[in-house]
Image: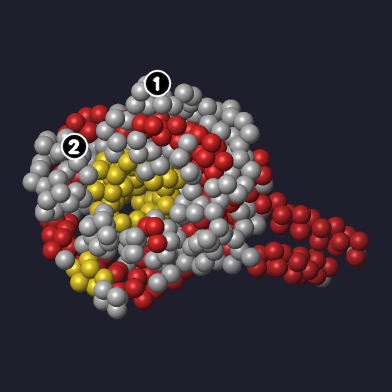
Amino acid sequence: MKSFAALSVLGACIAPALAGVLPRASGKLPPVTTKGNAFFAGDKRFYIRGVAYQPGGASTAADPLLDIKSLERDIKNFKELGINTIRVYTIDNSKNHDEAMKMLDDAGIYLALDANTPNYSLNRLNEASLHASYNDVYLQSVFATVDAFAGYNNLLVFFSGNEVINAKNNTNAATYIKAVTRDMKQYIKARSPRPIPVGYSSADVAENIEQQAHFFNCGSDDERADFFAFNDYSWCDPSSFTTSGWDKKVQTYKDYNIPLFLSEFGCITNTRQWNEIAALYSDKMTGVYSGGIVYEYSVEKNGYGIVEIDKSGSISPNDDFKRLAAAYKKTPAPSGDGGYLKEGSPSKCPPESDNWQVKTTLLPAIPEPAQKFMQKGAGTGPGLSEDSSQWAGTPSKTTATPGSGSSSSTPSPSGGVATGAAAEFGAVPMRALGVVAAGVVFGMGLMF
């Protein structure tokens, strides 16, 4: 009876500690992982067939996953298109997204999510602004976004940045973007119930896109991205696999050993016929590319978009929508493994040049005040606050030794996704529960 009483007290003491790790709906879709230069959902090759989804535009700082009524409306269109992924650029990391993520999961849709918001991001203006904006306040927001979404099986990937480099004179941002990528990977390994791919979404800058791709895939494993993506508008109808230059890009990246995909595509120079859909999911490209994300869902000031949304919230799919739906319907996801590269070597870091003004491969060390997040968690995010992190926190004071970003913590033992309360154990370290348990056992000894 003493043993039973001790266990009862132990359970009573541990219960409050577990109260903060109540399970949330992790979803039915299998989590997606990387293998070689491809994505896999379980044992099946996964190709991204997506649409960028940010009604109102990315700069409006509105979270589309909190507008449940509109999301429910739009999911019907996602199903009609036959997509499996949406990309969202801005979310409120202080809010709960269970309802939206379950709706997407029920519809068979994954989320590719940007970790930055307009006010919590790197400032590429110059070296001083880059240095100042890579700080602990910024990383707290990034890590809070990880915490907010890591428990959902249908969270596909995190983007550590989007088009931060858009010209040769701001390529010096590369080391800071790569540092954020490293930090996110470390935080996920330390705090998340499962591995989640982290990578960069690049502008297709002709002068240095290849250098960008290789820079984010060179160096130590902790620094290298899990994937690389770029926003490619080079296929402008009428075009073809060769006219667009996509054949040359396949050749350029044939030995690239991490997943590669188009984080945006869909040139509007002429009427979009979407003939690139057939090429992107053909055996001409599947050995190198893992699909892509059409830009974009709603028609905004920039003229892209496949649906019109009026002031009342009513939507009208345009001809672009109809042609895209037809293109996807004619081009099912490939069967088999698509001839992916099973093994390969990391890239060599590109040398400094006029088009690649990156003087070192050494990355800034994580700002000292941000180190505590790896053990204690990030806490509640700032959401879509009007405050800005860019000049608010403590920046990095030194460069990091390659390999120093590795974490000794690991995700769930199976390498898969923890479920139930275990899915939230990233929020309460097991050692903390151990301390509770040890204290109770010690107390039992004194009691009996």
Query: Mark 1, mark 2: which one is toward the viewer?
Result: 1
What residue sits 53% from the left and 61% below the top? 385
On-image quarter of the C terminus = bottom right
**Residue 431 in the image: x percent, y percent?**
70, 51
Q: Residues within 10 Å of mark 2 (few under 14, many from 20)?
A: many
Which secondary structure, mark 2?
helix
How many numbered discs?
2
Kindly identify which numbered label has been placed on residue 351. 1
Say how the picture is coloured.
secondary structure
Residue 343 makes an appearance in the image:
no
- For the residue pair 128 and 326, the one nearer the viewer reads as 128
**Residue 12 in the image: x percent, y percent?**
74, 70
What residue sits 11% from the left and 37% below the top? 243
Residue 15 makes an appearance in the image:
yes
**Residue 336 in the image: x percent, y percent?**
23, 45
Q: Amino acid at mark 2?
A: Trp
What residue sits 15% from the left and 49% below the top? 269
Q: Amino acid at mark 1?
A: Pro
Q: Residue furthest bottom?
A: 312
On-image quarter of the N terminus = bottom right
What residue sits 20% from the left and 72% below the top? 316
Q: Residue 387 vs residue 43: left or right?
A: right
Give the labeled residue for mark 2: 246
Mark 1 and mark 2 residues within 8 Å of each other at the beta carbon? no
Residue 229 picture quarter: top left
Q: Earlier in the sequence, mark 1 or mark 2?
A: 2
Which secondary structure, mark 1?
loop
Q: Residue 55 vs residue 279: left or right?
A: right
Vertical comparison of 269 with 148: above or below: above
Q: Residues within 10 Å of mark 1 (few under 14, many from 20)?
A: few
Q: Residue 403 vs residue 283: left or right?
A: right
- For the residue pair 366 and 447, the one nearer the viewer reads as 366
